[in-house]
Image (cartoon, rainbow, N blue to C red):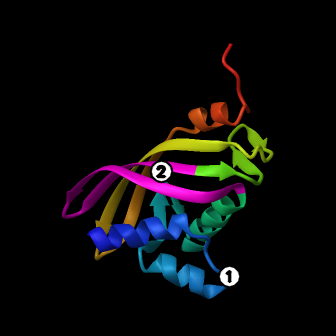
């Protein structure tokens, strides 16, 4: 799974190309559709999420902190580090570019079937990112 994990992380670290090649690369790793936090998404929507990530951030790095693996599950905990250079869409609205560096703690719980990710539960520290960007302040 080590090479598959690297291929997975690369999909999110590097900007996806244009056209069908990007979707084909994601289909090598993800089922189409894939369930994300309970909602089914087509691979095209994952590619668009990756593009949005790269519009918002530059120099994306991911540091794997921990992983737990079973035959049908992979759980990874990692830091994502980047610089905020473009509009970031959040549940609280759009955060305009700040040029600030961010660190986001993330845990992904991935379900695997026939070599593809079929289900993902993502837990990411969005509040911490919003605080780092100055979009929220503590009372």
Which of these two is toward me, 122 or 65?
A: 65
Look at the picture and state if 20 lies above or below 48. below
Identify the residue shown where x is 41% and y is 73%: 7
Q: Does residue 10 appear left or right of residue 95 in this picture?
A: left
Residue that badge 1 annotates: 18
Magenta residues? 56-81
Gap in angstroms between the C-alphas marked 2 and 1: 26 Å
Q: Quadrant of residue 119?
A: bottom left
Identify the residue shown where x is 70% and y is 55%: 56
User: Where residue 37 is drawn, which disc sits there?
Assistant: 2
Dot 2 or dot 1: first in sequence order is 1
Q: Which corner quadrant holds the N terminus?
A: bottom left
Q: Do we see residue 41 in this rendering?
A: no
Q: Residue 129: image x %, image y %?
A: 61, 38
**Numbered disc 1: secondary structure:** loop
Q: Residue 33: image x %, image y %?
A: 49, 70
Identify the residue shown where x is 22% and y is 57%: 69
Q: Quadrant of residue 46?
A: bottom right
Q: Does residue 21 appear left or right of residue 72 in this picture?
A: right
Identify the residue shown where x is 80% and y is 45%: 96
Asked if residue 61 lies in the magenta stretch, the reply is yes
Which of these two is toward me, 55 or 122?
A: 55
Q: Residue 49: image x %, image y %?
A: 62, 62
Q: Quadrant of residue 60?
A: bottom right
Magenta highlight: main SS: strand
Which of these two is toward me, 4 or 117?
A: 4
Q: Residues within 10 Å of mark 1 (few under 14, many from 20)?
A: few
Q: Do we see residue 99 in this rendering?
A: yes
């Amino acid at each position: 799974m080590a090479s598959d994990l690297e291929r997975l992380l690369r999909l999110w670290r590097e900007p996806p190309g244009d056209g069908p090649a990007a979707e084909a690369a994601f289909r090598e790793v993800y089922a189409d559709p894939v369930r994300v936090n309970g909602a089914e998404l087509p691979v095209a929507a994952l590619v668009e999420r990756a593009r949005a990530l790269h519009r918002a951030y530059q120099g994306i790095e991911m540091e794997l902190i921990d992983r737990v693996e079973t035959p049908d599950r992979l759980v990874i905990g990692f830091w994502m580090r980047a610089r905020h250079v473009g509009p970031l869409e959040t549940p609280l609205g759009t955060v305009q570019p700040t040029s600030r560096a961010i660190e986001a703690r993330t845990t992904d719980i991935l379900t695997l079937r026939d070599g593809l990710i079929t289900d993902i539960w993502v837990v990411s520290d969005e509040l911490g990112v919003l605080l780092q960007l100055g979009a929220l302040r503590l009372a």
